[in-house]
Every structure is written in structure tokens, then in C-alpha cells.
Amino acid sequence: MRRPDIDDRLLARLIFAAAVFLTTYFAFLPNLPLEWRSPGSPRLYLIGTAGSALLLVSVIFLLAKRTGRGGSPSAWFAAHVVTAMAGAVLVSVHSAGRLRYAPALLLLALLGLVALGVWARIRLSRRISATFATKHGSFAPVAGENRERLQAVIREKETLLERLDPGAREGTFSLTLVHWLRRPAASRAYARLVREEHRLLGTRGTVSVAQAYWRRVHIALSVFFVLGLIGHVAVVTFWAGYVSGGEEIYWWHITAW
Amino acid sequence: MSQLALMIDLERCFGCKSCEAACKQEHRLGPGEYRNKVVWLGDFEGEGLDFLTLTCQHCERPACLRACPVNPKAIDRNPATGVVRVLEDRCTGCGECVIACPYSAMGYDPSGHHAVKCDLCPDRRSAGLDPACASICPGHAISFGEREELLACARGDERSVRDHDHFLLKPQTIYLERINGNSRGNGSAVSPTEFERRPAFVDAPKAHQVFAEKGAAFPYGKVKEEVKADRVEPAGCNICFNCCSAKFHFKGNELVQITGNDEDPVLKGKLCPKAQMTLQMYHNEHRLTRPMKRVGKRGEGRFEPIGWDQALDEIAEKLKGVRDKWGAEALALFIGTRTGLITKNGYVRLFQQMWGTPNIEGTDPFCATGKSVAYDLVQGIVGSGNSYTPEDMGSAEMYLYIGDNQAETRPVYFGMINDWRIKNRAKMAVVDPRYTVTASKADRWLPIRPGTDMALGLAMAHHILSSGLHDRAFCESWVVGWERWRDFIFERGYSPEWAAPLTGIPAGDIRSLAEDVARADGCVIFGSRGLNQHTNSAQTNRVLMYLAAITGNWGRKGGTYFNMTAGPPIAPDAPPERRPKMERPRVRRSPAGWVEAMRRGEPYPIKALISCNNPLAQWPGLEEVREAFRDLDFMVHIELFPNETSAFADYVLPAAGGIEKGEIGRTNDDRRIVWIEKLIDPPGEAKPDGWIWIELGRRLGFGDVLKEKYKDSRVFWDEVCIDNDHLRGVTQRRLHANPYRWVRFPVASEDAPEQETLYLEGTTAVGQPAGKRFPTPSGKLEFWTGEMEEKFETLGLSALPEFYSEREQLVDMPYVELDHGDAAMGVISPFHKSGPTGASRCRIVAPDGEGPGAALRARGFDTELITGRPPAPHFHSWTHYFWQAQEMWPDQYCQIHPDRAGALGIRDGEKVRVETAHGGIEAVAWVNAGIRPTAVFIPIGWGEKQPYHPWRPVNFLTDKNQRDPVSDQTNLKSLLCRVTRA
């Protein structure tokens, strides 16, 4: 059976369509009625909410991928791509082009996330595939190198694992959300050993910086975005007075502190 | 179950990449997607060349698995078998596993966006088969099984297992170290090492971009269920001279896979990469599918599609016009081996006889006529009588390769030889200007100056004869004229000291090599294009044949002179009364000698050409050849792919190939005739060559000879092609009576047994009176006879081979000067059996310090240019239309020694310009020490009209006029050039 995937051509078409739509939209924005130029108007409020909801599919993808619940991770990944892109378009519309305010940073993060994701899928994929067979030096005979530190780390991991997950085998074990929730201290200690092992292996340093760190940047940006989104919702909902700066509060809110 | 593993023998692997091709077929992997890869490694310090088959290590502590962020993991490890696999439906394509694997053995599908990796072919395992790579490896370098058993085997063979567990991941894939002292020409340490480098141009991302954009052709990239075979048919491969049996896997009528034929008792299911990649020939968007008529200027490449009837009617009318105006011989036929032997030696031969032109030739004069003439003279028939069997070639104590890079040109055969070498602890030596792949497996590499192999052979013989190391009994019983030759080389002083400055090989090394050959109980001396493609081709081959004979290595098992190939004698004749008398002799044996007739009409005009090959990339001196083709009145090109030649044609006719038409394999090393069954229809309106020649013949009134029923090549084979003592038993019935579809000739009847080794003592040669061991006039090997002397005198030479080399050399040495240019008819050659053929008298010119070589050196041509075959995935131009062959070896390259590159400021992977006195081209530099410091090497096969990586072909650098007076063979191996950064 064919695995669910969005091929490069479709992804490029989606991003192109989104770009054309937003460019056209912002080009005509000054001529649109006020309700399309006010982010808090009922219409744009709803659009922003819908966009945020779509973006939250990515969080579900994360949970599905990390917990094993919810079906095929690759199907969720495809959903994450499509909904994130659609969400980004809606959130951009919601912004009404107001880029001089703090929430614009979220928009910037969102555009960064989309751009990074699309670049990784279309361009970086080839670089990832080209990694195959580039580390031929690893096949040279071992010539008296010091493997003791690595051995010590593995022993420490094995010892710790007896507490953390008694049935597990160190060679095929990695931490999951469940471990972090149930045994946070032991998990933290184990994660430190994993980092130490990675440092000793040095594999991340054997590929390009872009390949090594794009995903971490993507995750960091998404964390920043989600936290920012929560903050934004909280501020406009509870600190509507602060946000309005003394002007009319025309969006739905709970308190006007 | 114990842990399963692959065991990869670095001594046996010779980098052919067949395992890569098999893996991509088995798993339908597209461009950029790998589960295994063979890495070529070299270094700047020595001439090392090593190969690393890089695949998953199936680690006990798989770093990839632990790096996978999906839960449950998208990678798992079977605790029973130890197999680590990717669960593609769970993989989200983040690439963390690719980063984590310190062996870089985790692949990635860039278009499907998920990790891929070796899983040891579970489908094959469940069917009781080995993984695809292990079953097909021509080098017998990959074994599969339970790990403990593999290790026990290694111990039993006293082989060392490499410890490459730098990361304590407990890799399970076993690597056997190279055998000490046998890894390099200089005997230095074993490798691969971390200090070695890959050729930059092979991994250049820009070169691979083209595939990423184009994607993969069917069936690559398809899911398993869509292309799972439901039927398997045996047939053969038609792409090179190894002539492998193969199995063709079909789903319905669609060809989905090509594998080796494991029922073949000789080849045992081994297959080279290009044979597998013919799958990309049968499914190829670049194939010619309709007849086309030129509408633009000649060479411009503008055509319009037309129907077959219109094309053939118009061609027939135009040919008649040429005949009426210029005579029948004004039509030349250039029929390459691409067309298949049945076409070349059957259909076209009959057409040529009925038409009445003597000007017909194939690619032989560019490849092998020198050795053919030499075999005819010495043995009375072309080809060695030995076979690739353990009892015959496998029993040799020594293998000596001179100018034969068998590992890349016939990889399946080399895999057998190398396997026997290792098992029997036989010696192997390689004489070649390059540290070839073949040399990388040898005990000894002798980097000879190109064009001086005759001097080496003479000096070795001098030492053997002067030391009494020759096989006196064999010489006295079975060699005519050997004393005369012995006296000749003594008189001329062809000693090792004489040869040393000519060859660049120290006299001591020549002596020691000679002693090794003489003392071995069975030595196979291999020679090939490195000897043949010279102006001294025939004489060099004769000298080396003499060397084999005086050491008793002739007419025995495990000892022979082996210059491929031994073509089946297919030579049907039209009824004499239907053949018009040919008024004039053939202009020249070599098509290169037809150029003057095309351009200037001398000695008589050639005005029309039917070509079934790619002469505009293949003939030497392309600048002049293209001018000549522009001057033709009429030209037809019959091919599979459009190329440089097509662009010059008036009509381009789409041809069928391989299993699209019913054919035998090309001329083969050891007399196996492989029947290639017609299993599929050609694409579009393409037709088998036989169909085209019969239809054209019918329009010219030859229908009574080129009969309609012969369009079925099986009928043509049985009724027309095999009517002689060698082939009479190779009937369709016999070819189909076994599951591997080949029969070894000669077999005079259907029930006659095959002969593994010909010319053994006490036997009689085929078609000869009883007791005549060899098919020469004397029944013995002939070094010198009075009749032979007369023949050589016709051309101004002696029958006793006198040393001369090429005119373009870095040191002065004798060379041959032709008295007649191609515009003159000259004399009739006594060496060509196929009919009167023009040739030139000649003289050997002694060096005087002012010869052509000195003049060129003064103009800055200071480097030896060698041309030759590229690595195993390529063969001439076809493979350049296969995306995977281009993925493996994308660009035309120029191998250059680091010393020379450093002096010229050239870095690995940079573009260089190479010029000779005859033209210039560009290529990408491969800086590698495996070549004489004074030489560069550029492979053949690339062309300007190829779809992926077009390059101006190397034959713009060669010279059509430097030819062997005896065989008309062109020198393609020794020219002076200069190299600069482009």
C-alpha cells in the first residue's frame, strides 16, 4: 500500500497558491471594508481562531507521533503540512497586515516555520539522501582508539535503565513522553547520558549544519509560536484595555484590564 | 534462529556496483535513494584503489533506531534475526536516523520523504533466496547467512575479519580484510582507510540534480504490489561481450525485473550492473519509436515522423539513385555489434552480397582486428579454445593481464578469475599504464608506457629462451618457425635491458615476470584493447601468442593466450548467381579509411551510408568524419536512441534490441552462444533489424534470398546461420533444451557434446583431417613460414615481428609510416579474408630525434593520452541513456596523476581541457595516482546528444590515419596531448 505523502510538486503548488492568494489579498487590502482591516473584527477574529485551530493539528501530530496513539504518523504528518499551511494563510489574513505590533513576531515565526518546513521537504531531502555512504572513514579498522569513555556511558545507561524501564534493552531504548511523565528525574539523567554518547559519537557534526539543526530550529520556532499564541490569546482576552491603548475594544474579550 | 548477516570480502569486491543495481531493482529505488552503495576510494600518496560496499551494519545497538523520534519506533530490530528495518508507513521523514548512523548506511527517499535501509530482502529470504546483492555479485564478494557460520567460513579460509566498531554499536555486517601484500601494486598496507578520497565528480550534487528533476522510469519508484512478477522467462543479455544468461521477470506483459540465471552452471546467476540496467533500456522515454525523415540541415537534428512504408520506399528509391549514378560500391554499410550478430553476419551480409558493395564493416577495426589477424596467422582460427570453468581457466597458477581491464569490461568473468585466484592462491600480474580495477586485485602492477607491449613481450621471450625456460618439447612438436624467431630476437638484441627504457619497466621486473610465466603450471595471458588499439596491433598480439606458446600455454587446460573474443562463424552466402560482381575492392578494412572516399571521392566515391551504430562518437578523428558525413548524398541511421549520428541522417529508423527481437549474444570470450528470446514488443513502431533489412531488401528485389519467413529470427537462425561444422548443432531446439539458453560451440550436430577446451594434445581441430591439432596449414602453431613472409612482404614488413611503436610518444622509438594515404587504393591486403581490400605498404622508421613525436613535444604536447572503456556500469553510448548508469558515473572524466595535476594547478573535480594535434575536448578531472605520472586517461562513450550529461566525445582527440598496416586497426591508446584548466 502506498504510504501517505505530499509529493514535492503538490507541496510546491500549495505554497505557490498560498503565496499568490496572500499577495493578492494584501494588495487589495486597503480597498477592502474596515472589517477586513481590523484583526479583532468578528470576521477576522473567527478567521484567526480557525487558523489557530488548524495550526493546533500540528500539536496533535506531535502527540500522535510521540505516543503511538491516533494512527499513522505519516498520515498525521501530511495533515500537519496541509493544516499548518492553511492555518498560516488564515492567521496571515487575521493579521490584516498590521506588522508593527508585537503579534507580528508570531506571524514571522509562522512564516519561518512554513518556509523551513517546505525547504526541508523539497530541498533538504536531497541532501539527506546524499548523506548515504559519505562516512566511509567509519569503516577503517579500529586503530587503538579509546572506546573506554563510550563503554562507561553505555554501562551507566544500562544501570539507570534498570530503574527507568526494567524490561528495556539499552541498545534499542529511547525515552518517550511516558518516561518523562512517570520518572522525570531518571529521564533527565538518562537524557544527559544520551547527549554525552552523541557527543562522543559526534555524528551530528558529520553532516552539514543545515541538515543537523533544521529540525531543532523548526521545533524551537514552533514552541515559540505556540507559547506566543497562548500569550496573544490571553492578552487580547484579558488585557483588552492594554491592547486597545485607550481606543475602542471591538473584539470579543473577557476583561479589559 | 541465529543472527543473519552479510559478509563482504574486500579482496573480492572490485567496485562494479552490480549490487547497487540489484538492490535498486529489487526495491524499486529511484534516483538518490540507496540501501547500499559501492564507494571507490583512492589516495594521493600511492596508486591505491579500493572499493567499499557500504550497507547497513544491522547493529546490535542501532543508533538509527534510538534516534527515531516516533513512538512506537519507525525502525525496529528483529531480536531473532538481528535484522534492522524501517517501517516506512510510520516514518515521517525527519532524517534523524540518517544523522545518527555513523556508518552513513541509512538511506533516504528524497521524493517519497522517508528513510530507507537494507532489510536483507525479506521477500527473497522467505522464498529461500539470498538477498539480491549477494545473489548477483559478479565478484562473489557478498555472502549471506547466519553470522556464526559466515565467521566460521572466514576462519576456515584463514581470512581476517575487520574490527570497525568504533562506536560500540556492535555492527553485524562482516568485512573481510584484504589479503596482506595483495592490496596494492606497491604492496603497501591494507585498506580502505579513512585517508582515502572518493572521486569528486562522482558525488557532485550538481551532476545528480538532473535525476532529481526527471524522476525514475517504470518500474522504479513503484510500490511492491504494483510490480510483483507473476512470470519468469530465461534469455540473455546483449549489451556486452560477457554474454550473460539472465532471467526476465514479468507482471502480465510488463517487464519488471532482470536478474541473473541461477540455473546457469557457469555464470551461476551473476550479472553485471549494465545487464540489469537494460531494464532502463526497455522502459526508456528516450527510445526512438517512429521512422523519421530529416527536414532540417544535415547535423541540425530536425526531423518529421513518417510511416514505415514511406520511409522504406523512399530509402530504396534513393539507394537505387546512388547505385545508378555512382555504382553499387558507393554504398557503405557500418554495422556495429549493437545490431547483434545475426543481423550483422546474417541479414546484412546477405543484403550486402545482393546489393554488391564490398564496403561493409563493423566495429572490429576499432577494437580487435589486430588480434583476429594474429590468431588467424598463428592458430588458423580466431579465439582461444579455453573456457571459464574451474577445470580449465580456473586451474591456472598464474593470470597475466596485458592491456586488458577485465574487471570493468567483463566483470562476471573477472569475478570468476579473481575467485579462483584467491581459492587457489594463484598469482596475478597486470601490465597496464593505469592502475586499473583489475590491477587493484593483482600481486603486481607494471605501469607500462602505452604502445610498447610488443617490446615487453619480446624481452620476456628473450629472457625465457636465453635462460632455457621455454617448453622445448611443445615448441619442437607443435610450433613451426620458433627457432627462426628465437634467432631473430637474439640477433636484434631484444633483451630486458633493451626493453626497459622503451617500456618504462625495469629489466629486473621484466625478467621476474618472464620467469613467473614460464614456471607457472598453467598461465593464462589475457590481452585486449590495450594491445589491439595500436598501430602495432597484429604484431604485438603475435609476439604475446608466441610467448604463451613457448611456455607451453596453448592447447592445455589452465594455460592460453586469451584475447577476447571467439565469435561464432556465422557467414551465410547468397546464391552465387544472385550476387552481382563487385568491380572494385573494399576501400579499406577500417571505416576510418572510408573518410577520404566520402570527402574527396578517392580512390572511388562512397556516397551513401547505412549505419547501425554511432560512428559520429566512435570513429577516430571526428572533426574530419563529421565533414565527410556532411558530404554524403544519402544516409540512413538505424538505432535505438537518437544520437550524434542520427542528427546527420536523412532517415532515422527505430530499431529493437535484446529481448525485443530474438537474437544471440555478442561475440563471447569462451564460445558460449546465448539465445536471447524475444519476450516483449519493441516500443512504438520500432522494428527488429532483421525486419528492416528484409523489407528494404524486398523493395530492392532481394526477396528471394531475404525471405519473408526470415523475419522470425529463430527460423533464420536454423535455416541460414548455422550451416557449418562449428554451429550445426546449435539449433533452436538445443538452445531451448536447457534453462540457461546457451550452447558452447563447436558442436557439429545436435547431439555432439560441447568441448570445454579445444586443441588439447591428441585431438583434431574442427573440420580438419584427423590428427591435425590446430587449424593451420601445418596443423601446428605457426610463428614463421615462407608463405607468411610473402604476405608480410606485400606490406613492406617482416613476418618475424620487428619492434615499432606509435609515432606520438614522449621518447623516440621506431614507428610505422604508411606509403599510401586512404585516397589511394594502395595494395590488396593479404590479411583480410572477407574479400579484396585496399591497404597501404609501409616502412618502419628509425628514431632520429626529429620525428613526429619530437615535433609534437616541441609544440607543448607533453602528456600521453590513453582512451578506453569507462567503469563497469557503462558500455559505449547506450548506458548514457540509463539514468542509473549516469547516477553512478555521470561525467566524462580525465584521470590525471596528482603530480601532473599539481603542476598544472588542477584540482579534483575541476573541468579540464585536453588537446591533441587532432582536436580538443573538455572533461572533469579525476586526480588519482593510479596512472603513469606522464599520462592521462579519458573514457569513451559520452556524446553531445545524450540526455543527462552530454560531453564532446573523446574521439575528437584521436587520429583516423594512425592505423596498423597489417590489420588496419586504429591507434586509440597512445597520442600526445596537453592538459589545461578549462
Image (cartoon, coloured by chain):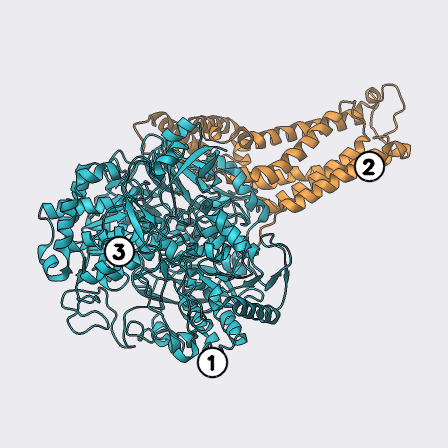
Question: Which shade is chain A?
Answer: orange
Question: Which shade is chain B?
Answer: cyan
| Camera-nearest residue between A213 and B619 | B619
Image: B387 above or below B817:
below
Disc 3 target residue: B562
| Camera-nearest residue between A89 and B447 | B447
Residue drawn at (63%, 44%) of the image: A8
- Residue B621 is left or right of residue B385, and the answer is right
| Camera-nearest residue between B974 and A182 | B974
Disc 1 target residue: B704
**In this rendering, does residue B590 appear at all?**
yes
Where is residue B630 drawn, in percent x and y? 55, 54
- Badge 1 sits on which subunit? B
Image: B695 above or below B933:
below
Where is residue B343 drawn, in percent x and y? 44, 68
> Circle 3 sits in a helix, a strand or a loop, which is it?
strand
Disc 2 target residue: A25
Crowding at label 1, few (<14), some or many (≥20) Cα neighbours within 10 Å?
Answer: few
Find the distance from the CA under tag 2 to the CA under tag 1. 78 Å
- Residue B643 is left or right of residue B772, and the answer is right
- Badge 3 sits on which subunit? B
Pair 2/1: label in front: 1
| Identity, as a three-letter code, of the amino acid under mark 3 | Phe
Are both tags, 3 and 1, on one chain?
yes
- Residue B385 is left or right of residue B689, and the answer is left
